[in-house]
């Protein structure tokens, strides 16, 4: 017997929502950990969340969830580039380095929270045209 196509699509979307929730929670832990000095588990969770998103994003093709995978992956990559670019500030000027990383971490947290809010509302992330 074949399964009802509407039910199959609903199960697919529910699975993507569950996966998105797990990914967003991992990213949220990383984002909060970035604001707390000495949070050593954050990089491990970030890698886990990024690999999860990279591996499973093909499952979301054609759904509103695809924009969330793109949002999370871009957020991590942009933050990584910004952290690397501002890392020399830590070696030469402690206070500017701390301020730069604080700003990046707050931006990262904002992106993750706004993504979680939209996903929980069932809305895709909007990208500039």
Image (spheres, rainbow, N blue to C red):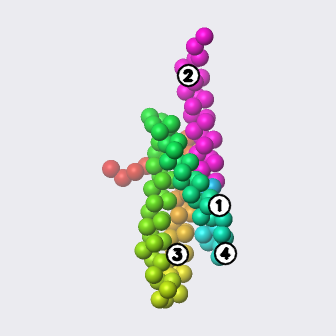
Q: Which residue is mark 2?
A: 6
Q: Residues within 10 Å of mark 3 (few under 14, many from 20)?
A: many
Assess whether residue 87 is covered by the magenta stretch. no
Q: Dots 1 and 2: beta carbons under 8 Å?
A: no
Quarter of the image where one finds residue 32: bottom right
128 sits left or right of 59 in the view? left
Label at residue 29:
1
Image-based side of 20 in relation to 89, left or right: right
Which of disc 2 and disc 1 is earlier in sequence?
A: 2
| Residue stretch rendered in magenta on the structure | 1-25
Q: Which residue is mark 4?
A: 38
Q: Quadrant of residue 113?
A: bottom right
The residue lying at 48 percent from left, 58 percent from top is 75
Q: Which residue is mark 3?
A: 101
**Marks 1 and 3, the one that precedes in the sequence:** 1
- Mark nearer the N terminus (2 vs 3): 2
Residue 4: within the magenta? Answer: yes
Q: Is residue 64 visible?
A: no
Q: CA distance from mark 4 to mark 3?
A: 14 Å
């Amino acid at each position: 017997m074949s399964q009802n196509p509407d039910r199959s699509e609903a199960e697919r979307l529910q699975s993507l929502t569950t996966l998105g929730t797990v990914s967003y929670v991992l990213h949220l832990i990383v984002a909060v950990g970035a604001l707390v000095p000495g949070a050593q588990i954050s990089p491990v969770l970030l890698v886990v969340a990024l690999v999860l998103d990279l591996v499973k994003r093909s499952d979301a093709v054609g759904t509103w969830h695809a924009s969330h995978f793109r949002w999370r992956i871009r957020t991590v990559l942009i933050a990584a580039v910004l952290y690397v670019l501002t890392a020399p500030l830590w070696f030469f000027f402690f206070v500017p380095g701390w301020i730069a990383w604080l700003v990046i971490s707050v931006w990262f947290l904002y992106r993750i929270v706004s993504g979680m809010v939209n996903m929980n509302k069932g809305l895709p992330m909007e990208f500039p045209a």
